Image (cartoon, rainbow, N blue to C red):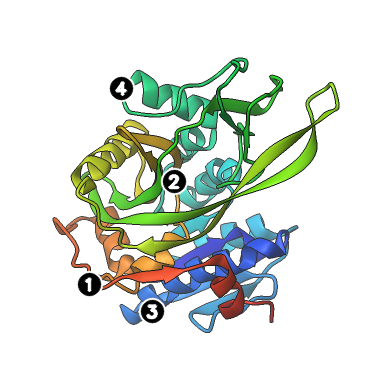
Amino acid sequence: MKILIAEFAVGTDVEKSLIPEGAAMLKTLAESFTRLGHEVYYPTASTRICAGTSLESTAENFRQVIEKKAGECDAGLLIAPDEMLPELNRLLEENTANLGCSPESSACCADKLRCTEILLNAGIGAPELAAEPEEGREYVIKPRFGCAAEETYLVREFEPAEGVIASEYIEGIHLSVSLVAGEKTLPLTVNRQFIEFGTQKCAAGESGKEEARSGIKYNGSLTPYETPRKTELIETAVSAARCLKCSGYVGVDIVLADRPYVVDVNPRPTASLFGISRVMKEEIGDLLLRNKFGGLPDSVYIEGEYRFSKDILGEIFGQN
């Protein structure tokens, strides 16, 4: 088969700091499909991953490259900022078989407010949304439409603002569950996420009052993370993916406290895939194809563990 894999950071060079993570995911997928005997094509503005065939692209023509090549391929997969996924997945679906989430599901996950409301209404654990701060409590504020931990802060005070949501801060272990979702849902691994908190001074809201905010940043993961609460975590992640009608590879971010709290649902490959591919016997490319065309196994075989940081990804996938 001919397979198109389009990763936004690599394909556009718009945000160079995201290229190491993007290239890691792209290379992992391209190598997997290539090992299976498929032809892989990927748009790139400058980065080469030494797997598959590169397609010259820029920020200006990224969509056009996807549309043109998708029509020549049997299947495709997109990795992009969550707010862009609905449009790009629709473009992909109009031209080939989409191995990822539908535009509708992508849109639900991209809207953090809507996503949280859907999960809470379904009885799935998630941080409660806050309209205004209460004294003595901590909150996480982040863009309503955003990617990963981008512009995400831990605060005691906040001013309601359009395009920003606030939710209660849950103290616990930061984890993620990776799975392949479709007619049946196949859990892959539970991963430990390394989250860093760094205090910074910034103006808060319209008042311009300076306050201390603790920035929240993702810095790699450990795969797999062994815990006696694995079943509870997987059940929560599977319920979230089904509730949001996700398909393909999905990463569900969870804070584990008195119960698992879903803090984000990523309707696309995540950086954890870089580690999973090193401990999973099965090929992720095979699982994605079988998920789309039928025949997913009931489980996967995991052996050993793998730990990586964003710094390591930067060293491996630095700018060429």
**Residue under the image location 22 percent in, 72 percent down:** 303
Q: Please state which amino acid type lies under the numbered disc 4.
A: Gly
Residue most extreme to the left: 298
Task: Specify the quadrant that holds the N terminus.
Answer: bottom left
Q: How many residues crowd around disc 2 within 10 Å: few (fewer than 14), some, or many (20 or more)?
A: many
Distance in Å between CA atoms under marks 4 and 1: 34 Å
Q: How many residues crowd around disc 3 within 10 Å: few (fewer than 14), some, or many (20 or more)?
A: some
| Residue that badge 4 annotates | 123
Distance in Å between CA atoms under marks 2 and 1: 26 Å
In terms of secondary structure, where does tag 4 sit?
A: loop
> Eyeballing the image, is 214 above or below 72?
above
**Residue under the image location 36 percent in, 18 percent down:** 121
Report the mark closest to the observer, 3 or 2: 2
> Eyeballing the image, is 274 above or below 141?
below
Residue 126 at what x, y percent from top left? 40, 29
Q: How many residues crowd around disc 1 within 10 Å: few (fewer than 14), some, or many (20 or more)?
A: few
